[in-house]
């Protein structure tokens, strides 16, 4: 049994550390590489090339976009799916304009400003002064770097609307969402729950977008239970 973990923009495998420390003692884990490609399709193909013939897929944020593409390309290879803090629609005009603003800042050499602007929407309002947590978030962003961030932005901006393909996801699926997520909404989760046959939703209270770090024990327990580990 192998679990493939794929996360979001400006995040690295460090976002999975609390879960990976436990999962690695019980199963094989693979961290998908989402740093090399500027399309979601490219990220999905890279994931599939690195993964074994059958695997469980755990996807967070932008990783969810990659997961939807994996399910379109190779649905029979995925035994089960966990979707954390993600959504199915593609960007509307407002989201596209915001991302273009980020790109302009980075191209002007102001990557650090992008990181600081995003922190308030990444964590629960009560955690915005949590220096140990913010140190991890800033460290992941620094490790990601400006050029990789630009590739990730372009991939996200060019992604497909995954809502029409949700009904084709046949594997067992769990959806995990933090109640105070500043990026994805309850409505987004309802779309996933209604669209994916037999899906189950778990809501984590007092939690923002980065549930794996904000509520690590809760997420670890949910994943271990889901994966029967």
Image (cartoon, helix red, strand yellow):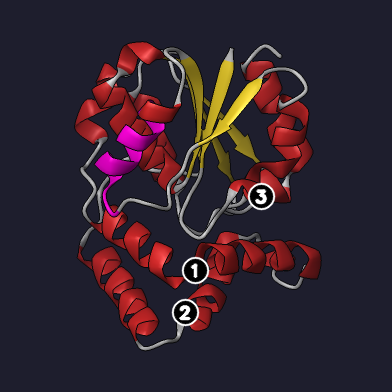
Query: Residue at the spot x=65%, y=25% of the render?
Result: 223
Q: Position of residue 120 (x, y in %)?
A: 58, 70
Over which residues does the magenta segment extend?
A: 38-48
Q: CA distance from mark 3 to mark 1?
A: 15 Å
CB contact under 8 Å: marks 2 and 1: yes
- Image quarter (top left, top right, bottom left or bottom right) of the N terminus: top right
Query: Residue at the spot x=68%, y=18% of the render?
Result: 27
SS class, disc 2: helix
Side of 138 where 77 appears, left or right: left
In terms of sequence position, does the residue under pointer 3 or pointer 1 come before the other?
3
SS class, disc 3: helix
Q: Position of residue 3 (x, y in %)?
A: 57, 23
Name the residue that disc number 3 marks.
Answer: 14
Side of 145 where 102 appears, left or right: left
Residue 165 visible in rendering = yes
Instruction: Say the numbered circle drawn on residue 228.
Output: none
| Rendered position, 152 above or below 32 | below
Q: Is residue 20 magenta?
A: no
Instruction: Say the numbered circle drawn on residue 145.
Output: 1
Name the residue that disc number 2 marks.
Answer: 111
In terms of sequence position, does the residue under pointer 3 or pointer 2 come before the other?
3
Q: Position of residue 68 (x, y in %)?
A: 33, 32
In terms of sequence position, does the residue under pointer 2 or pointer 1 come before the other?
2
Q: Nearer the viewer, residue 147 or 162?
A: 147
| Rendered position, 80 above or below 58 | above
Q: CA distance from mark 2 to mark 1?
A: 8 Å
Q: Secondary structure of the magenta portion, mostly? A: helix
Q: Can you tell which quarter of the image residue 43 is in?
A: top left
Residue 173 visible in rendering = no
Q: Nearer the viewer, residue 100 or 52?
A: 52
SS class, disc 1: helix
């Amino acid at each position: 049994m192998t679990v493939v973990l794929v996360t979001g923009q400006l995040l690295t495998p460090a976002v999975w550390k609390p879960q990976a420390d436990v999962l690695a003692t019980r199963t094989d884990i693979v961290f998908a590489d989402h740093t090399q490609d500027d399309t979601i399709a490219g990220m999905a193909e890279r994931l599939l090339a690195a993964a074994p013939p059958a695997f469980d897929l755990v996807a967070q944020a932008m990783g969810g976009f990659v997961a939807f593409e994996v399910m379109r390309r190779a649905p029979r290879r995925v035994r089960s799916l966990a979707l954390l803090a993600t959504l199915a629609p593609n960007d509307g005009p407002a989201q596209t304009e915001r991302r273009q603003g980020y790109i302009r800042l980075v191209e002007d050499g102001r990557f650090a400003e992008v990181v600081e602007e995003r922190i308030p929407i990444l964590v629960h309002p009560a955690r915005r002064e949590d220096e140990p947590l913010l140190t991890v978030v800033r460290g992941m962003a620094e490790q990601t770097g400006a050029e990789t961030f630009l590739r990730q932005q372009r991939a996200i901006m060019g992604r497909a609307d995954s809502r029409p393909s949700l009904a084709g996801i046949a594997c067992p699926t769990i959806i995990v969402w933090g109640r105070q997520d500043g990026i994805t909404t309850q409505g987004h989760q309802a779309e996933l729950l209604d669209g994916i046959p037999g899906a189950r939703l778990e809501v984590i209270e007092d939690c923002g977008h980065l549930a794996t770090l904000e509520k690590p024990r809760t997420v670890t327990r949910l994943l271990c239970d889901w994966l029967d580990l």
